[in-house]
């Protein structure tokens, strides 16, 4: 087993991982010219000096470092003279500090890195959407050293995984503990939105309201089967994937508390976990963490930097988002019993259906395999759920109707005040 683990840039994390089969850390600056797969508000600030020191510390511990250049879209900056200059400068710095590999999501970035920085190994991001044999072969033919397969599309497609492994010689990696919805129709939009959120020079300057994330998390509360109908791989099921020829697994999430990341590594290294599966796969809602911990240092300064931006959005319309973040444990630890609990032991046997059956062309309502396991494994506190869903509804109404971006509320007749359709508008 080999594990590639997200880093929060805490020096103690590296010390804690020495006794586990961790071969690599992955991460990046909060913002750079390329961007990546997370918005700046999701990541702790790390300077170039701190990142370089972290890479050196990992190297001394025998752990490699993978720098993420995995934006699904660069906004065509990569085909401009100025963009090329900035990308080259970034890659030169990455190479100089001892980074051993980078992750990219576009064929052009793959070819650029392999041509100009051949010492760097190049991994293909999950955002490249590799979910079948021919796609994997094309990436390998273009020079990819490793491919992270599209977990949303293939983690439950065991026959597909078997055929891809047989068809290519390059390394293959599986994302183990993400919990996006399998076959999610929002995925292309989400990848591109995240890519632009973290690119320097963006007009939004770090501001981002993640509608896709909000919609996904609301759907799970509304229908518990969506917790099961997701892309995660249980630690207990790793042997099934290992038998298919996979031994490199990716463990998320960046900027989580060190104790949470370590607990995830322990569970996957042991190939067994007893407890709430959400502790391994959800990027928020933690218990037993000090409120002053790195992940929860999201006070007024953080809000001013990323949310209170009156030139871009009506700050008052973000109050449901703040309330939602508090209810779901996104800005402070949860107390008491977890509002959602997925009994991992109740999921024993879940993977059996996928050994010889596909989900690609199956109506979930006809199959109902995931529904059966949701009924036995998922427990949701109804009072907490109802409060959260009310906040989601208010937030979505504001976004879908447009009030989020109006300074004044809608009039009774539906015409927004201050608009050019408003008789009181002065022009």
Image: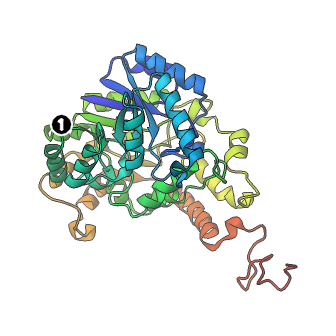
The residue pinned by badge 1 equals: 242
Residue at the far front: name it.
81
* In this rendering, position of residue 29 left or right of residue 223: right
- Quadrant of residue 42 within the rendered picture: top right
- Relative to 279, is 362 on the left or the right? left
Nearest the viewer among 311 and 277 is 311
Looking at the picture, the colour scheme in use is rainbow
Name the quarter where the N terminus is drawn.
top left
Q: Is residue 369 shown left or right of residue 39?
A: left
Residue at x-position 54% and y-position 25%: 51
Residue 118, picture quadrant? top left
Q: Mark 1: few, some, or many residues within 10 Å (few <14, many ≥20)?
A: few
Q: Position of residue 110 (x, y in %)?
A: 38, 43
* Extreme residue toward the top, this view: 60
User: Does residue 334 appear in the picture of this structure?
Assistant: no
Q: Position of residue 185 (x, y in %)?
A: 39, 64
Residue 191 left/right relative to 417: left
Q: Nearer the viewer, residue 91 or 44?
A: 91
Asked whether residue 291 appears in the rendered view, the answer is yes
Percent coordinates x, y for residue 244 in the rendering: 15, 41
Residue nearest the viewer, comparing 327 with 114 = 114
Total count of labels: 1
Local SS, label 1: helix
Closer-to-camera residue (329/421): 421
Quadrant assignment for the C terminus? bottom right
Vertical comparison of 394 with 269: above or below: below
* Residue appearing at x 73%, y 51% in the figure: 308
x and y, in percent, of residue 94 in the image: 49, 29
């Amino acid at each position: 087993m080999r594990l590639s683990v997200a880093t929060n840039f805490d020096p103690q994390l590296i010390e804690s991982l020495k006794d586990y089969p961790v071969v690599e850390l992955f991460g990046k600056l909060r913002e750079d010219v390329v961007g990546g797969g997370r918005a700046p508000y999701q990541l702790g600030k790390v300077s170039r000096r701190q990142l370089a020191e972290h890479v050196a510390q990992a190297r001394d511990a025998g752990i490699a470092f993978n720098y993420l250049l995995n934006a699904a879209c660069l906004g065509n900056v990569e085909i401009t003279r100025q963009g090329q200059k900035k990308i080259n400068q970034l890659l030169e710095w990455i190479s100089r500090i001892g980074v051993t590999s980078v992750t990219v999501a576009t064929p052009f970035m793959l070819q650029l890195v392999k041509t100009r920085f051949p010492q760097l190994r190049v991994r293909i991001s999950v955002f490249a959407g590799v979910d079948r044999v021919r796609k994997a072969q094309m990436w390998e033919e273009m020079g990819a050293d490793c491919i992270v397969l599209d977990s949303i599309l293939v983690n439950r497609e065991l026959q597909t995984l078997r055929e891809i492994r047989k068809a290519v010689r390059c390394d293959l990696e599986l994302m183990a503990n993400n919990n996006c919805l399998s076959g999610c129709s929002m995925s292309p939009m989400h990848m591109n939105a995240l890519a632009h959120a973290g690119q320097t020079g963006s007009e939004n300057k770090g501001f981002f309201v993640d509608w896709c994330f909000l919609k996904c998390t609301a759907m799970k509360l509304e229908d518990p089967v969506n917790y099961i109908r997701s892309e995660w791989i249980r630690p207990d099921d790793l042997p099934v994937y290992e038998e298919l020829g996979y031994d490199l697994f990716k463990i998320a999430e960046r900027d989580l508390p060190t104790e949470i990341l370590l607990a995830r590594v322990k569970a996957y290294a042991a190939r067994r976990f007893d407890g709430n599966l959400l502790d391994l796969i959800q990027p928020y809602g933690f218990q037993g963490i000090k409120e002053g911990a790195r992940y929860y240092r999201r006070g007024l300064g953080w809000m001013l930097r990323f949310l209170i931006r009156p030139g871009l959005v009506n700050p008052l319309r973000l109050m449901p988002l703040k309330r939602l973040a508090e209810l779901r444990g996104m800005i402070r630890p949860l107390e008491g019993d977890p509002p959602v609990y997925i009994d991992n032991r109740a999921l024993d046997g879940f993977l059996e259906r996928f050994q010889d059956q596909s989900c690609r062309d199956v109506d979930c309502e006809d199959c109902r395999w995931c529904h059966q396991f949701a009924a036995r494994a998922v427990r949701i506190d109804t009072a907490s759920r109802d409060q959260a869903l009310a906040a989601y509804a208010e937030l979505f109404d504001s976004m879908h109707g447009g009030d989020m971006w109006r300074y004044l509320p809608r009039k009774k007749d539906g015409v927004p005040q201050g608009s050019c359709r408003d008789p009181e508008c002065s022009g």
